[in-house]
Amino acid sequence: MSDMTRRDMLQSAAILAAAGMLPATAKAGDNKKLKILIAGAHPDDPESSSGGTMALYADAGHEVVALYLTRGEAGIRGKSHEEAAKIRSAEAEASCKILGARPVFLTQIDGATEINTGRYDEAWKVIKDERPDILITHWPIDSHRDHRVISMLMYDAWLHAKKKFELFYFEVEAGQQTQHFAPTHYVDITTTEDRKRKACYAHPSQDAEKGFYVLHDEMNRFRGQEAGVDHAEAFIRHSQSSRGLL
C-alpha cells in the first residue's frame, strides 16, 4: 500500500458525500431517508456546533431534528425565565427553518438541569419516538453543566436503544467549553457555512454576530485547515456505534 500523509488521510475522511457522515447502509445514491438528531443543551447549541452538517443533510432530503434540553430560560439578562424562554424558543424555531430542521424541546430549565431516573426516562421517550439513524450531541468533557447533562442523557438513551444508531459528539466554543476534543470525522461545510452563520445570527438575544459565532467561525476555519477544505465541522464517533461509516 502506498504511503499517505496525515493531510491526505484527513482530507479523504473529511470530504464525505454531500450530506457528510453517511452510514455504510445509506451511502450517496441510496434512496433511504435518514433521520439525523442533533441534541443540544440550549437554543443555539445544535446550530453553532453542527449547523453546516444539518443543512447538508436537509438539502440531501434527509430529516433533521434539533433537540433542545432547555428553552434558554437563564440566557437573557434582565428577562424572567418565562420571557427568555419565549424569546429563545422563537429564535430556535427561526434558526431551524433556515437549516431545514424541526425543533423539539425537552422540559428542563436552563442553569438548573439535572440527571435522575425521571430525566433519563424523559430523554429515552423522545429518542424512542424519534428513532434517529444518527445522534450527535455534546462532548461530555465540557465546562458547562447543562452540556454535560444532555450528553449523559443521550448516552444513556443510546445504551437503552442497544446502540442501534450512530452516536457522535460535537464541539462548542472549543477550549473554553468543550475540552480534550480530538476529532475522528470532519464534514466539509464550505457550501453551507453561510446558512449556518445566518442560523446562528437568528439568535439576536445572544449577540451571535459579535459574541459566540466569532469563536465558532474560527473553529470552522481551523477544522477546515485540518481537513484540507475552507470550512469544516469536527466530530467524534463513539467507537461502539453499530453500523460503521463509509
Image (cartoon, helix red, strand yellow):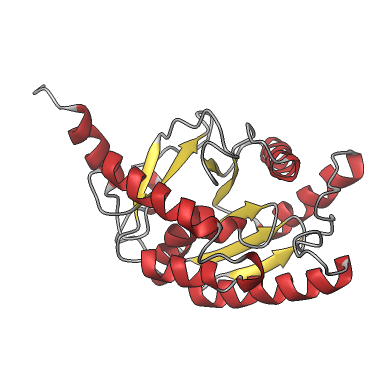
Q: Nearer the viewer, residue 42 or 167?
A: 42
Which residue shows up at 39% across the image and 40% down it?
Answer: 185
The quadrant the C terminus occupies is: top left
Relative image position of residue 146 (x, y in whole percent): 74, 45
Which residue shows up at 61% across the image and 61% down it?
Answer: 44
The quadrant the N terminus occupies is: top left
Q: Nearer the viewer, residue 174 or 147?
A: 174
Which residue shows up at 77% across the image and 48% down it?
Answer: 124
Q: Is residue 117 left or right of residue 189?
A: right
Q: Is residue 160 left or right of residue 93?
A: right
Residue 30 visible: yes
Residue 58 visible: no
Q: Nearer the viewer, residue 209 or 63?
A: 209
Determine the image quadrant of residue 30.
bottom left
Relative image position of residue 138 (x, y in whole percent): 61, 43
Location of residue 61 with respect to 69 vertically, above or below: below
**Numbered circles on residues, count:** 0
Relative image position of residue 29 (x, y in whole percent): 29, 61
Which residue shows up at 66% across the image and 69% down it?
Answer: 103
Location of residue 227 with respect to 189 vertically, above or below: above
Relative image position of residue 136 (x, y in whole percent): 56, 48
Location of residue 88 with respect to 232 vertically, above or below: below
Determine the image quadrant of residue 42.
bottom right
